[in-house]
Image (cartoon, rainbow, N blue to C red):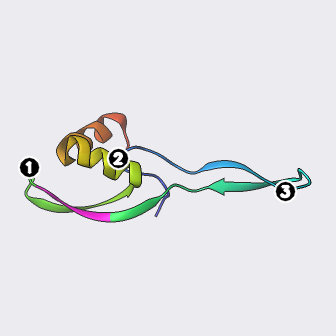
Amino acid sequence: MSKICQITGKKALHGNNVSHSKRRTKRVFDVNLFTKKFYWVEEDEWINLTISAAGLRLINKIGLDAAIKRAAANGYL
């Protein structure tokens, strides 16, 4: 499973761990992802999405159908 949100397109960022002595080592900032099952009323079917917490808030705000159409237009699905 790739670590990319299917609704918002968010993915892992790379950065540094910085110790007290300012020594830097590479690290990865992962996205808060989880898989969730949604009932898509317009298509009359259940779908599984790998979404971030921000993607879930977007679905709650604009609706599942509008969020899927926006993600498809941006190329995330």
Decide: few, some or many residues near mark 2? Use Cα within 10 Å; few <14, some 14-19, many ≥20: many
Which residue extends farthest right? 21
Q: Is residue 36 above or below residue 22?
A: below
Would residue 38 be counted in the magenta stretch?
yes
Who comes first in sequence, dot 3 or dot 2? 2
Query: In the structure shown, which secondary structural element does the residue marked by tag 2 occupy?
Result: loop
Which label was assigned to residue 7? 2
Q: How far separated are the C-alphas under marks 1 and 2?
A: 17 Å
Q: Amino acid at mark 1?
A: Glu
Q: From the image, tell me which residue sits under label 3.
A: 19
Residue 68, given in percent of the width and then of the height, sits at 25, 44
Decide: few, some or many residues near mark 3? Use Cα within 10 Å; few <14, some 14-19, many ≥20: few
Q: To which quarter of the image does residue 17 belong?
A: bottom right
Q: Amino acid at mark 3?
A: Ser
Residue 20, given in percent of the width and then of the height, sits at 87, 56
55 relative to 23 in the view: left or right: left
56 relative to 47 in the view: left or right: right
Q: To which quarter of the image does residue 40 belong?
A: bottom left
Who comes first in sequence, dot 3 or dot 1? 3
Q: Which residue is more in the foreground, 34 or 6?
A: 34
Q: Residue at x 50, y 57 (%)?
A: 3
Q: Amino acid at mark 2?
A: Ile
Q: Residue at x 18, y 45 (%)?
A: 65
Who comes first in sequence, dot 1 or dot 2? 2
Which region of the structure is painted magenta? Answer: 36-40
Which label was assigned to residue 42? 1
54 relative to 17 in the view: left or right: left
